[in-house]
Image (cartoon, coloured by chain):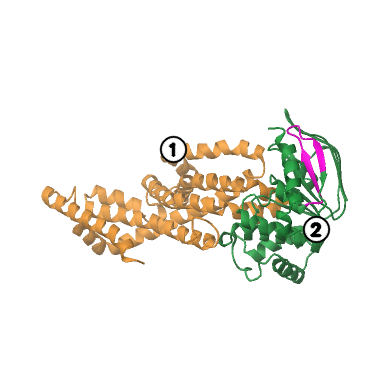
Chain colours: A orange, B green
Amino acid sequence: MEINKVLPPILVLIVFLFTWSLGASLYNMPFLLPNPLEVARAFVTDFDMIVGGLWITFQEALYGYLLAISIGISSAAVMSQSKILERSFYPYAILLQTLPAVAVAPLIVLWFGFDMQSVVVISLIISLFPIINNTLLGLKSTSINLVELFQMHNSSRIVNFFKLRLPAAIPHTIAGLRISAGLSVIGAIVGEFIIGSGSMGGGLGVMVIYAQADLETALVIALILTATFLGFAFFMTVTALGHQLLKHWHESEIA
Amino acid sequence: MISVSEVTKNFDEVHALKEVNLDIATGEFVTIVGPSGCGKSTLLRIIAGLISTQGSVEKPDKGAFVFQDAALLPWRTVQKNAELLMELEDGFSKEERVSRVSSALQQVGLSGFEKSYPHQLSGGMKMRLSLARALVLRPDYLLLDEPLSAVDELTRELLQEEIHALWKEEKFTAILVTHNVAEAVFLSNRVVVMSPRPGEIVHVVDVPFKKRDQLLRSKAQFSKLVNDISGKLRSWK
């Protein structure tokens, strides 16, 4: 990696931390605005707890995300098969997006219980739509000449799907997955806010609530940074996967 | 032999083709020229069986279509793109595929590029690959829809010579649609001139030249024939 690629964002970070630190010293109300060093200290002293919370939120978000990927891609695949199917179901996919997940959460708790599965379901609902939407767009944007080429050589619907539409949709699906990566973590945190710790112990969201109640602001910030890192890690994983799949042929990944 | 009879096509309110009759002998090279929107690409797709029609088309079993933009699968290597139609048609063993692809790539001068991806090829090479992909089927007829409209002038002339050589070697029946009258004259036994919409065949011009090479382009008879046909096309403008 070249130095002039890494240096600018690091400089921005240093300036940001310095300004924050200066502001915190001048303001001098650590329970409202702790110094960055105190946040670092919270990371060290509460390390085991943070890692424990991270592990739980990681599982919730991962299951929600994996479910969103499988349900999203398969429902887009079904909708791509006919105009009627698309017209019948796509409006409800949009409603899924406009559905206020936070408001629905109590209902989900009623149905799935005060436990991890409810958090997973909320994470799923929040991260589903971009995957459906982008995959469907990709499945439908195959070039007309390629469709005609396959038609002329008698390819079946199945062959057409797996050899033409699905590979052509991959760049779009990856774009949807990148949007949903962060959303799945947001969904898990929102779920924890409403559902609480359940039987599996508290995740990062639950810990944020408790730390806030105790005015442990440095810990709140440490937890938020951890959740942010988790979403970022999901994003980077999908981006790396996308790079592997597209590096030989798609404009976005060709060096 | 390809026989098009009484082919008429309307898209809703648009009359695209009107009572087109055309017989093409086995092994013949026929080019269709006409003003934009005259329905010549539609006629080619009707012959391919991609568009339904009133009227009838008789043709041999094995055919292939070469598209204007090469229509390659960008995620497949040159080798895999050339194998595509054999995968779709079934009944080709792995060995058969490999040997047919290697000889077709040889014919179009793409040997050594088997592992490349389409984005690494020039416009001319993409079109060569598209031709190779069609040739592996050993087609009885080949339908070409403005295959050379996207390449530069020099490449265009070279590819015309290559298409001519492939046609002589493989002896398929060819129907080409193009805007370029010189290209039509250079490649064909007959040039079919269509009218603006609704497209009708208004002239059929025989092209008498025996030898098709670079020299032909500078001959007076060649230019005269090109001018004659261009004149017929210009009469609608």
Q: Which residues are magenta?
A: B188-204
Q: Is residue A130 left or right of residue A154?
A: left
Residue occupying image coordinates x 30% and y 51%: A208
- Is label 1 in a helix, a strand or a loop? loop
* Residue receiving disc 2: B139
* Residue receiving disc 1: A100
Q: Residues within 10 Å of mark 1 (few under 14, many from 20)?
A: few
Pick the quarter of the image with the N terminus of chain A. bottom left
Q: Inspect the image, locate mark 1, and give the three-letter code of the amino acid beneath it.
A: Pro
Question: Closest to the observer: A148 or B4?
Answer: B4
Image spot of residue B105 (x, y percent): 69, 67
Give residue B11's quadrant in the image: top right
Check if residue B189 falls in the magenta segment: yes
Farthest residue, direction front: B220
Give residue A245's quadrant in the image: bottom right
Q: Chain of mark 1?
A: A
- Is label 2 in a helix, a strand or a loop? loop
Query: Alpha-carbon distance for marks 1 and 2?
Result: 58 Å
Question: Closest to the observer: B96 or A75?
Answer: B96
Image spot of residue B140 (x, y percent): 83, 56
Q: Is residue A193 left or right of residue B232?
A: left
Q: Inspect the image, locate mark 2, and give the three-letter code of the amino acid beneath it.
A: Pro
Residue A139, numbered circle: none
Q: Does residue B233 lie above or below B173 as drawn? A: above
